Amino acid sequence: MTADGYFGRFGGFYVPEVLVFALKELQAGYRRFSQDSDFKDDLHNLLCTYAGRPTPLYFAKRLTDVVGGASIYLKREDLAHTGSHKINNALGQALLAKRMGKSRVIAETGAGQHGVATATACALLGLDCEVYMGETDVERQKLNCYRMNLLGAKVNVVRSGSRTLKDSINEAMRDYASTSDHTHYLIGSVVGPHPYPTMVRDFQSVIGAEAKEQTLAQTGRLPDALVACVGGGSNSIGLFHPFAEDKEVQMFGAEAAGEGIETGRHSASVVAGREGVLHGSRTLILQDDDGQISETASVAAGLDYPAVGPEHAFLSGIGRAKYSAVTDREAVSAFHQLSEAEGIIPALESAHAMHLATIVARDLGSEKALVVCLSGRGDKDVDQIARLEGML
Ligand SMILES: *Cc1c(COP(=O)(O)O)cnc(C)c1O
């Protein structure tokens, strides 16, 4: 990494002047507490006693046999409290907010998963919580709104723009610019201006650190490959980062090809995006010829974001990680495959990684091993798939 939040030429700090003070304070706060052993101990304790860490590394034997290729190990983030990896980052940032003397936390959410994780962390730590959510998303995800209310959070409905995730991020940034003296903005992925891509990666790196230790203990060596889905890119970078210097370990990211890259209805920012600046960061973005942000689509709401974390743009550019796009149809098929082969219903986001894992496993061949991040559980998606398949 280059200095000050840059990954090669990607990343950075492209924000309006009204946000500079807040973000400089956050950079200093994060720099201080990321080196503070009391902070690290407290976070580690919360992750272990509250969030259910370490999550298991599970050898999926039946799936491995069905696929025919490298041994497939699942990093079970679906077993973390609230059902996905998002709690790792929410707890980390909420604890940081508290240490920095903030009493209020705001967040943006698309499908509601990050909003629920944030509301959970705030309830645990006694922080006021408000979550910005687009009107379109509120209608699609009523139950997650109610969940956030149950957890004591207030949902602010966003009626600007396309009334979805990117508009919620804009509203949350506006709020943060005028309230940062007592408010922390808890971003849900490795996106946004410095320090978020670095800070969120560090909080999610617990995934890869555990996976590394667990594969060594279970197999006596490092895995040959890592596979994860990429929305903003936090579960994937969390798995990848602790292996960054292990050059023999290959890295694969699965983006959402939606209805197919050629249809334009997808969310594959690395595979099909162009360089630009969005939400304070230079990265790969889905945009039209005028630089207007494209509408995105995916069966998995958590992958539906028109950009990607800047570190992924960098890793793709230097060839350290490889990115491919998985269609809705392929993901739904992998969703069924894992459910039947292993008795594990994956989140639709994670099902994208599962599909790519089967391809990588066959390419590697049977003497090899790979770890795939099962980023979340699929209970939230069962209703949607049942409807899609005409069962409800
Ligand atoms: C939100 C979400 C994702 C995508 O976010 P990343 O920042 O790319 O990890 C993936 N899986 C699940 C289960 C999610 O909830």
Image (spheres, helix red, strand yellow):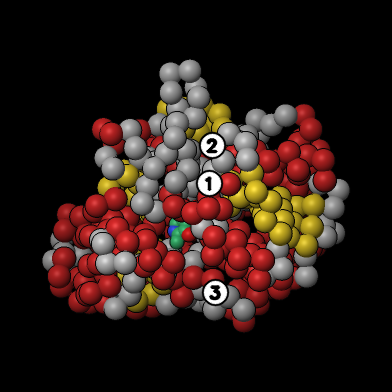
Which residue is at the front of the view, 381 or 334?
381
Q: Is residue 76 left or right of residue 145?
A: left
What is the secondary structure assignment of the residue under circle 3?
A: helix
Q: Is residue 69 left or right of residue 336?
A: left
C-alpha span from label 1 to label 3: 27 Å
Who's the residue at 79% across and 33% down the image? 18
Query: Pointer 2: what residue?
Result: 162
Q: Residue 193 is drawn in which quadrant?
A: top right
Is 75 positioned to the left or the right of 179 in the image? left
Q: Is residue 179 visible?
A: yes
Residue lying farthest bottom? 49
Task: Name the N-terminal-most of marks 3 and 2.
Answer: 3
For the C terminus, the image quarter is: bottom left
Which mark identifies residue 8?
none
48 relative position to 289: left or right: right
Image position of 150 with respect to 326: above or below:
below
Disc 3 to disc 2, C-alpha distance: 31 Å
Q: Which mark is residue 136?
A: 1
Q: Quadrant of the N terminus?
A: top right
